[in-house]
Image (cartoon, helix red, strand yellow):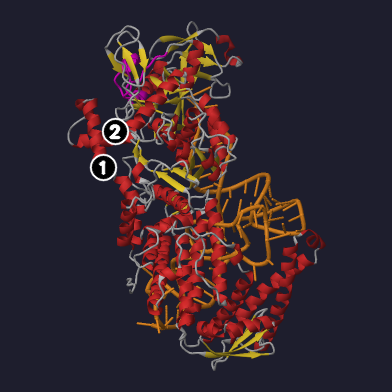
RNA sequence: GGGCGGUUAGCUCAGUUGGUUAGAGCGCCUCGCUUACACCGAGGAGGUCGCAGGUUCGAGUCCUGCACCGCCCACCA
């Protein structure tokens, strides 16, 4: 049956067909393995994208890398579970639905909480799957049968369980502290959600008169409006300038309130005047100082960033208007001593961009230290390893500096805090809504209105997705997960929290010992960790290395790139550019190049099919059985056979090693160079003669080798380019593959015995000779079609034998009419190529362009002389001979001989052409 | 203020423990529709590896300093 393929690879239709096939056939679904399963396990949790999300380059990179690793493991026989899901994304989702309501002229507040949440669920039903649908186009081989959503009932129950346990353990508390307040979002946010940016601001110096004297004290502030809430002025106890004022009071300007002068380390003598105003309700440091001195906390800014009643005449003004007014009034009344330009680092809400105000507020917190201690230990003892390694220290530094985590959010969408208030004042923290108050028996219970930080629930996913708090077989098998692949950005938001929660709640957990052994984790002691390894991938930037942003307008949409060049090419781009630890400048011209690569593969396949059909070779005879790990039924009979087999095994070895170390770029580049530069450019060209042989045994044998090597190459390539490899692989079997999919076939494993250095060396000489002839032809401007006779002088009999054996190949690839061997050097002939192994001369009526040839020879001579000098310097250095390893010295010596030959030939050529100096 | 990363061909980047001649893709130049592929083939040009020292037999690779670019963290009024 003939294989009909279009001349150009068209990814669109093919990709969606296979993506659907993989899903429909449930190819990547992993049921709970039975106890007698003897395979190693690989588990990976997909970092859940926000339900509101749209696929961007970051996702695509992340998922491409994960999919490569996952497919690679699956093909190597691991029970491979990749768990997908989405995150409810509290603030983001609420804001999105809010916006939608507003456009309909409705509002969340009128609607009420319950109706609003219903509405969000409706929204989720309609649009929440978008990002996962986009994922499907990428070919991500996740287990769709286990898809989760962070607000699913079972996961929500686990969240409540965690909250209650932490509360009972004294690790969750509620209290009034300074938090980062975003007025736009109407909620407190954690330190991590605040980004700092420098702005040109002013530093105002304000004079506070000392009560009962003519003296005064000057303080400095960047936020003058906050003075309305001052409750003290602090000076340093050691600062002698102010010793005489200890115990005195100042009169707060504008407010005419008397406040004390206190001594506190908050005031640093070197800064400004050494005196600092203390506003406990609106500054974190002042808050601490206020607690030390038992100062009143006077709130003057409300949750809408407006001045409140405590601000007296300024009440009702926005904080920035109030600032203006305060400054005016201070100036008018002579209290403003001076104003300086000053760079202020403002905190901005990560989500809304609003300037965050530190504000006193009652919130729920996680007491983080006990959790952090375990999370630090897990990494310090290498129970969890982080790649690239420099992130390990970054992680540890951050963990050592960690603050308590504010987990309550004043939102409606999210996991509502499982705490209820009785009218008697009793607080009940419980897994399910209590029927009555345990203290007074009252039934008028009101649930806390706050919800939990989104990261609280996502931090639990490694175990909650496996059935926790139940003790399940899935947990025994799949926990700890093997790997986590993620962006640096969420190392603290998510990775650190998972480690803390995992180490805490899974303490005492033991993975099935046999599986742990088989999977290669026998040496790991701690099974409570959420994953064994973390791989931090790079950031995708635009073609010029700039960070992508909507404002700059340089955002590259991966789906557009995919539409244009295909998923495989886009995946390949990301893989090939992903050197660990460096950012990726995504250049679509690169993707175009890999689209061309896909087309190259496609056409090589067409060539193979053409020959299979013509010669009558079927896949079944070339490549059975399906589970072998090498090249099957490949019978090397010629130099190029031995050579390509050797190369294939070497590349296979490199690819496996590269993937092991997350060196995706190396894996991708090795395959690319092999397939295009060696398999297509040389091997296929070389076997054409045999394929076209009159002798059917010869052509059959050659075709069988071609098919089996091609099939193995497809398996090697499959993790990076799943679609085209599946398409061709299925076609090789003419619709009757031995397995449902190439994704289930074995990944090639190198057979070191097939790595054959001597064939590689011989082949290199042959290639060198062919290239030399082509080169001379180009210089002589020989017509492409014209065949020319050549003379060859071989230095060694082995080289001569090599050329003789491969005479037809040489004639074909270099367009040579006949080869004559001569006994002496040909270097003196104009236009000859001379190397250390052979000289070659093309017989042709046209003369060489002497000037150009001279220039070329001179350049070559210069290079060789430089190398020779370098070579000699080293070889005459006794220290070098004594200390350098033998193979380096040997190599240099061999090279010295070659250089001598080369130099003498070059000189004689130059002389012959009378090039001058 | 602290920390991290980068600086290699016109552009975007590789270069794993220091080891013989520094690579790729794109772009550029010359030639070619040779029955897999013009999304192709053949040939070619192009680099004092940011600067200055140092260690070493040997440095793009290690150390120190400097310059420039970028990122992250941070409660200094």
Which of pointers 2 and 1 lies earlier in the amino acid sequence? 2
Q: Which residue is mark 1?
A: A127
Q: Which residue is mark 2?
A: A94
Q: Residues within 10 Å of mark 1 (few under 14, many from 20)?
A: few
| Residue plotted at (39% across, 25% down) | A161
- In the rendered structure, the residue with mark 1 lies on which chain? A
Q: Nearer the viewer, residue A262 or A57?
A: A57
Q: Can you give x and y, in whole percent of width and height, for residue A567 in the image? A: 37, 57
Residue A319 covered by magenta stretch: yes
**Identity of the residue furthest to the bottom in this view:** A845
Q: Residues within 10 Å of mark 2 (few under 14, many from 20)?
A: many
* Residue numbers of the magenta segment: A297-324
- In the rendered structure, the residue with mark 2 lies on which chain? A
| Residue plotted at (75% across, 65% down) | A889
Residue A900 covered by magenta stretch: no
Taking the image as shown, residue A406 lies to the left or right of residue A870, namely left
Q: Is residue A719 above or below residue A270?
A: below
Mark 1, secondary structure of its residue: helix
| Residue plotted at (72% across, 81% down) | A904
Q: Is residue A107 above or below residue A796?
A: above
> Do the residues indicated by labels 2 and 1 lie within the same chain of the protein?
yes
């Amino acid at each position: 049956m003939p294989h009909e393929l279009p001349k150009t690879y068209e990814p669109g239709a093919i990709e969606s067909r296979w993506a659907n096939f993989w899903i429909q056939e449930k190819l990547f679904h992993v049921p709970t393995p039975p106890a007698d399963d003897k395979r190693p396990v690989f588990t990976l949790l997909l970092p859940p994208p926000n339900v509101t999300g749209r696929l961007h380059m970051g996702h695509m990179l992340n998922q491409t890398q994960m999919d490569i690793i996952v497919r690679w493991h699956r093909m190597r026989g691991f029970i491979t579970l990749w768990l997908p899901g989405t995150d409810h994304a509290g603030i983001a989702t609420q804001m999105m639905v809010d916006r939608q309501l507003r456009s309909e002229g409705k509002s969340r507040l009128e609607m009420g909480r319950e109706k609003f949440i219903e509405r969000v669920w409706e929204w989720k039903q309609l649009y929440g799957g978008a990002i996962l649908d986009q994922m499907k186009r990428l070919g991500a081989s996740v287990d769709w049968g286990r898809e989760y959503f962070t607000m699913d009932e079972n996961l929500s129950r686990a969240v409540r369980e965690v909250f209650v346990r932490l509360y009972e353990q004294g690790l969750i508390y509620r209290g009034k502290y300074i938090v980062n307040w975003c007025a736009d979002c109407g909620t407190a946010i954690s330190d991590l959600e605040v980004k700092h940016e420098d702005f040109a601001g002013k530093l105002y110096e304000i004079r506070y008169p000392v009560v009962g004297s003519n003296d005064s004290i000057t303080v400095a502030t960047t936020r003058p409006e906050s003075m309305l809430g001052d409750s003290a002025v602090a000076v340093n106890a050691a600062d002698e300038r102010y010793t005489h004022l200890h115990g005195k009071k100042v009169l707060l300007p504008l407010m005419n309130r008397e406040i004390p002068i206190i001594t506190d380390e908050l005031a640093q003598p070197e800064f400004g005047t050494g005196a600092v105003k203390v506003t406990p309700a609106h500054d974190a440091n002042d808050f601490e100082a206020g607690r030390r001195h038992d100062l009143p906390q006077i709130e003057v800014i409300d949750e809408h960033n407006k001045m409140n009643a405590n601000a007296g005449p300024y009440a009702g003004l926005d904080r920035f208007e109030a600032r203006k007014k305060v400054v005016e009034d201070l100036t008018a009344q002579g209290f403003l001593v001076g104003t300086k330009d000053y760079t202020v680092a403002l905190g901005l809400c990560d989500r809304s961009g609003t300037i965050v105000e530190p504000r006193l507020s009652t919130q729920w917190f996680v007491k983080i230290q006990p959790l952090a201690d375990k999370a630090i230990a897990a990494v310090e003892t290498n129970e969890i390893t982080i790649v690239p390694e420099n992130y390990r220290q970054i992680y540890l530094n951050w963990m050592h500096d960690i603050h308590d985590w504010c987990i309550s959010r004043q939102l409606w969408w999210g996991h509502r805090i499982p705490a209820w208030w009785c009218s008697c004042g009793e607080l009940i923290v419980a897994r399910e809504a209590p029927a009555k108050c345990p203290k007074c028996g009252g039934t008028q219970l009101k649930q806390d209105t706050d919800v939990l930080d989104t990261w609280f629930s996502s931090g639990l996913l490694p175990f909650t997705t496996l059935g926790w708090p139940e003790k399940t077989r899935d947990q025994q098998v799949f926990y700890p997960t093997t790997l986590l692949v993620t962006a640096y950005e969420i190392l603290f938001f998510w990775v650190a929290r998972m480690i803390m929660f995992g180490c805490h709640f899974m303490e005492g957990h033991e993975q099935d010992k046999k599986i742990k052994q088989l999977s290669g984790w026998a040496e790991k002691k701690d099974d409570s960790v959420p994953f064994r390894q973390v791989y931090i991938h790079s950031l995708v930037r635009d073609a010029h290395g700039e960070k992508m942003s909507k404002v700059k307008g340089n955002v590259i949409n991966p789906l557009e790139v995919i539409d244009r060049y295909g998923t495989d090419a886009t995946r390949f781009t990301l893989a090939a550019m992903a050197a660990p630890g460096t950012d990726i400048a995504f250049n679509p011209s690169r993707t175009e190049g890999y689209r061309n690569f896909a087309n190259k593969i496609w056409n090589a396949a067409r060539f193979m099919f053409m020959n299979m059909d013509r010669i009558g070779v079927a896949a079944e005879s070339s490549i059975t059985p399906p589970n072998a790990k090498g090249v099957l039924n490949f019978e090397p009979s010629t130099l190029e056979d031995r050579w390509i087999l050797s190369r294939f095994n070497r590349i296979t070895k490199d690819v496996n090693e590269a993937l092991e170390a997350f060196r995706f770029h190396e894996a991708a580049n090795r395959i690319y160079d092999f397939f295009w530069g060696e398999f297509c450019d040389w091997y296929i060209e070389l076997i054409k003669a045999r394929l076209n042989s009159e002798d059917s045994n010869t052509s059959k044998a050659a075709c069988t080798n071609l098919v089996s090597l091609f099939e193995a190459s497809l398996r090697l390539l499959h993790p990076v380019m799943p679609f085209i490899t599946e398409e061709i692989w299925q076609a090789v079997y003419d619709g009757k593959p031995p397995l449902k999919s190439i994704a289930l076939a074995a990944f090639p494993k190198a057979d070191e015995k097939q790595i054959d250095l001597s064939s590689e060396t011989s082949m290199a000489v042959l290639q060198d000779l062919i290239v030399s002839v082509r080169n001379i032809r180009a210089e002589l401007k020989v017509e492409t079609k014209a065949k020319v006779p050549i003379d060859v002088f071989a230095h060694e009999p082995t080289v001569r034998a090599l050329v003789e054996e491969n005479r037809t190949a040489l004639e074909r690839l270099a367009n040579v009419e006949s080869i004559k061997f001569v006994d002496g050097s040909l270097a003196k002939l104009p236009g000859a190529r001379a190397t250390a192994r052979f000289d070659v001369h093309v017989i042709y009526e046209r003369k060489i362009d002497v000037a150009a040839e001279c220039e070329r020879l001179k350049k070559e001579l210069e290079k060789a002389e430089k190398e020779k000098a370098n070579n000699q310097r080293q070889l005459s250095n006794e220290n070098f001979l004594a200390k350098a390893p033998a193979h380096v010295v040997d190599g240099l010596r061999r090279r010295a001989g070659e250089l001598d030959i080369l130099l003498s030939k070059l000189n004689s050529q130059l002389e012959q052409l009378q090039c001058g100096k």
